[in-house]
Amino acid sequence: MIMEMEETCRLLLKEQVIPEQEWDSVGTIVDVKHLAATPVGAQVFLKATLVSVDGRRVTFEVEASDRLEKVGKGRHERFIINVPKFRAKFDEKARRLEM
């Protein structure tokens, strides 16, 4: 559920805020409560609402529901990144760690 909430927020940003190929976002904070169980295979509906933007830091309220009830809710923060720059730093760290 949490992975789907994060991806919903990421896709919302990509579609409506940062459509350029070289920009994306990474999750930085997840604060989500599981409220109820949902059987594997049940349809789940996800909702993400943008609540604040502070430079490249974006915060969302998220929730997940099945056809009967809300099954999760919380907040999620993402940071907008330049993918080539991020990858260069990542690759340099991997090299320094000898991976």
Image (tube, rainbow, N blue to C red):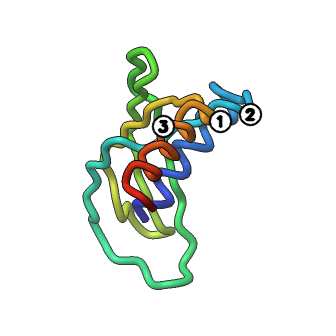
Side (left or right) of 1 relative to 20: left
Q: Which residue is painted at 72% across and 29% down in the image?
A: 19
Can you give x and y, in whole percent of width and height, for residue 91 in the image?
A: 52, 46
CB contact under 8 Å: marks 2 and 1: no
Can you give x and y, in whole percent of width and height, for residue 80 in the image?
A: 51, 29
Q: Is residue 66 above or below residue 87?
A: below
> Is 94 in front, or is 32?
94
3D distance between C-alphas at marks 2 and 1: 9 Å
Q: Which residue is mark 3?
A: 89
Q: Earlier in the sequence, mark 2 or mark 1?
A: 1
> Is 45 in front, or is 32?
32
Q: Residues within 10 Å of mark 1 (few under 14, many from 20)?
A: some
Q: Which residue is mark 1?
A: 14
3D distance between C-alphas at marks 1 and 3: 22 Å
Look at discs 2 and 1 and give the one toward the viewer: 2
CB contact under 8 Å: marks 1 and 3: no
Q: Which residue is painted at 42% across and 46% down in the image?
A: 93
Q: Earlier in the sequence, mark 1 or mark 3?
A: 1
- The circle on residue 21 is 2
> The disc labelled 1 sits on which kind of residue?
Lys
Circle 1: element type = helix
Q: Is residue 79 above or below residue 29?
A: above
> The disc labelled 2 sits on which kind of residue?
Gln
Q: Earlier in the sequence, mark 2 or mark 3?
A: 2
**Count of all numbered marks drawn on residues in the image:** 3
Circle 3: element type = helix
Look at discs 1 and 3 and give the one toward the viewer: 3
Q: Which residue is painted at 73% across and 28% down in the image?
A: 20
Can you give x and y, in whole percent of width and height, for residue 73 in the image?
A: 33, 52
Q: Is residue 75 above or below residue 45?
A: above
In the displayed image of the protein, which residue is found farthest to the top? 55
Side (left or right) of 90 relative to 76: right
